[in-house]
Amino acid sequence: GFTVGACLAAAAVCAIVWLAYSGAPRLVRLLGRSGARIVTRLVALILLCIGVQIVVSGVQEVLAGAVAQAFGGFPPPSGQGHPGRMAPT
């Protein structure tokens, strides 16, 4: 079931990381010093964007729950709208 799938996914990630690390010197030679620097900065930008999105989502969840509790309601289950908004009828 789930455990087997999780183990296979972890093994696949390990294999991909190994392939990336084993081929990195060749890729750096192919790209050159400035190309490798550009790729590094682009990857860093993508990771920064992902991190900011995670933080923003967490802050929204916390604020939605705090506002709902402050005004006498309970926050809806995650992914089911925002407190205070009425569902269309």
Image (tube, rainbow, N blue to C red):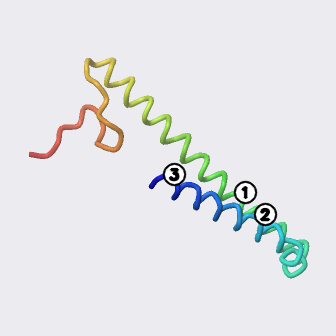
Q: Indicate whether 47 appears above or below 84.
A: below
Chain-order first, disc 1 or disc 3: 3
- Kindly report the distance in space between the C-alpha atoms of the residues bearing marks 1 and 3: 32 Å
- Kindly report the distance in space between the C-alpha atoms of the residues bearing marks 2 and 3: 34 Å
Residue drawn at x 61%, y 53% is 49
- Kindly report the distance in space between the C-alpha atoms of the residues bearing marks 2 and 1: 6 Å
Q: Which residue in the protein does label 3 denote?
A: 3
- Which label belongs to residue 61? none
Residue 73 is drawn in which quadrant? top left
Residue 78 in the image, given as x and y percentages of width and height: 36, 39
**Residue type at numbered disc 1:** Ala
Residue 57 in the image, given as x and y percentages of width and height: 48, 42
**On the picture, is 47 further left or further right than 60?**
right
Q: Which residue in the protein does label 1 denote?
A: 44
Q: Nearer the viewer, mark 2 or mark 3?
A: 3
* Front in this rendered view, residue 62 or 38: 62
Residue drawn at x 83%, y 77% is 27
* Front in this rendered view, residue 5 or 51: 5
**The N terminus is located in which quarter?**
bottom left
Residue 22 is drawn in which quadrant? bottom right
Residue lying at the far bottom in this picture: please name it.
30
Q: Which of marks 1 and 3 is in front?
A: 3
Residue 34 in the image, given as x and y percentages of width and height: 87, 72
**Residue type at numbered disc 3:** Thr
User: SS class of the residue under badge 1?
Assistant: helix
**Residue type at numbered disc 2:** Thr
Residue drawn at x 31%, y 29% is 75
**The C terminus is located in which quarter?**
top left
